[in-house]
Image (cartoon, helix red, strand yellow):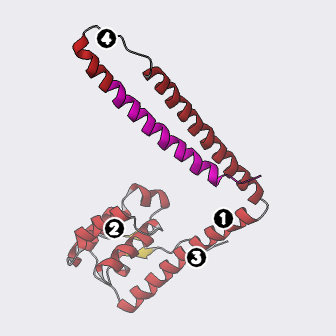
């Protein structure tokens, strides 16, 4: 059984480069690496403005995701950066905790895929591929029905519209043929990924 996540004080997070601050803030408050959009957003907020770091901490620590995880970071109204060596140690600890949790999750996934559950997972993958194959075949048949419906001659009352109707029918036929070819290519790709046997 693993130890509960370490609680951190804001003063332990205020050191380091802007990049390190954002990564450490996410790891400490959300126990995950920053997503690209969040990283860009907070980098724009704190880049070369260390006085804005507390605002970023308050926002992340008060987020719905952080509240759901439990308060893992204490964010007082005011905080000054703490001892740099203690902050470095705290950040190494939190990064190690998160990486160890990720490694454990990956080991469990590998065990599931290669162990007792491996056959069930392989069977599930096969069923998903077969379902996708059936879906693509259904799409191809629908396009074939559309194509057959388009090839029915349209009655033209005005001879001046005859060439226009013929041109439109050719455009529709070309579009449907192109779409049918694309769907058939997707079907071939899916079939190529299906296990043989």
- The percent position of residue 89, horizontal first and vertical second, equals 45, 87
Residue 1's disc is none
User: Which badge, 1 or 3, is on the more N-terminal residue?
Assistant: 3
In the rendered image, which residue does mark 1 sit on?
109
- Tag 3, which secondary structure? helix
- Tag 4, which secondary structure? loop
- The percent position of residue 19, horizontal first and vertical second, equals 33, 78
In the rendered image, which residue does mark 2 sit on?
39
Q: Quadrant of residue 36?
A: bottom left
Q: Quadrant of residue 138?
A: top right
Question: How far apart, in angstroms, are the residues tagged by discs 4 and 2?
Answer: 61 Å
In the rendered image, which residue does mark 4 sit on?
156
Q: Quadrant of the N terminus?
A: bottom right
Q: Which residue is drawn at 43% across and 75% down?
A: 8
Front-most of 112 and 99? Answer: 112
In the rendered image, which residue does mark 3 sit on?
100
User: Which badge, 2 or 3, is on the more N-terminal residue?
Assistant: 2
Question: How far apart, in angstroms, are the residues tagged by discs 2 and 3?
Answer: 22 Å
Whether the residues at callouts 2 and 3 have beta carbons within 8 Å, the answer is no
User: Which badge, 2 or 1, is on the more N-terminal residue?
Assistant: 2
Q: Residue at x 41, y 16 (%)?
A: 153
User: Which badge, 4 or 3, is on the more N-terminal residue?
Assistant: 3
Please identify, in this view, whether the residue under mark 4 or under mark 3 is nearer the observer.
4
Front-most of 18 and 62? Answer: 18
Whether the residues at callouts 1 and 3 have beta carbons within 8 Å, the answer is no
Most distant residue in the bottom direction: 85
Front-most of 141 and 55? Answer: 141
Please identify, in this view, whether the residue under mark 1 or under mark 3 is nearer the observer.
1
């Amino acid at each position: 059984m693993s130890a509960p996540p370490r609680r951190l004080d804001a003063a332990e997070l205020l050191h380091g480069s802007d990049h390190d601050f954002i990564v450490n803030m996410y790891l400490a408050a959300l126990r995950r690496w920053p997503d690209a959009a969040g990283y860009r957003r907070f980098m724009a907020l704190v880049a070369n403005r260390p006085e804005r770091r507390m605002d970023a901490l308050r926002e992340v620590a008060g987020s719905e995701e952080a509240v759901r995880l439990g308060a893992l970071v204490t964010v007082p109204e005011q905080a000054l950066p703490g001892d740099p060596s203690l902050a470095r140690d705290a950040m190494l600890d939190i990064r190690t905790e998160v990486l160890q949790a990720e490694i454990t999750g990956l080991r469990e996934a590998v065990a599931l895929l290669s162990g007792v559950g491996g056959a069930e997972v392989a069977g599930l993958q096969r069923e998903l591929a077969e379902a996708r194959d059936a879906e693509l075949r259904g799409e191809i048949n629908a396009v074939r029905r559309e194509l057959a419906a388009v090839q029915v001659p349209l009655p033209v009352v005005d001879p001046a519209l005859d060439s226009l109707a013929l041109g439109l029918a050719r455009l529709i036929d070309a579009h449907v043929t192109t779409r049918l070819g694309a769907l058939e290519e997707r079907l071939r790709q899916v079939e190529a990924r299906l296990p043989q046997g």
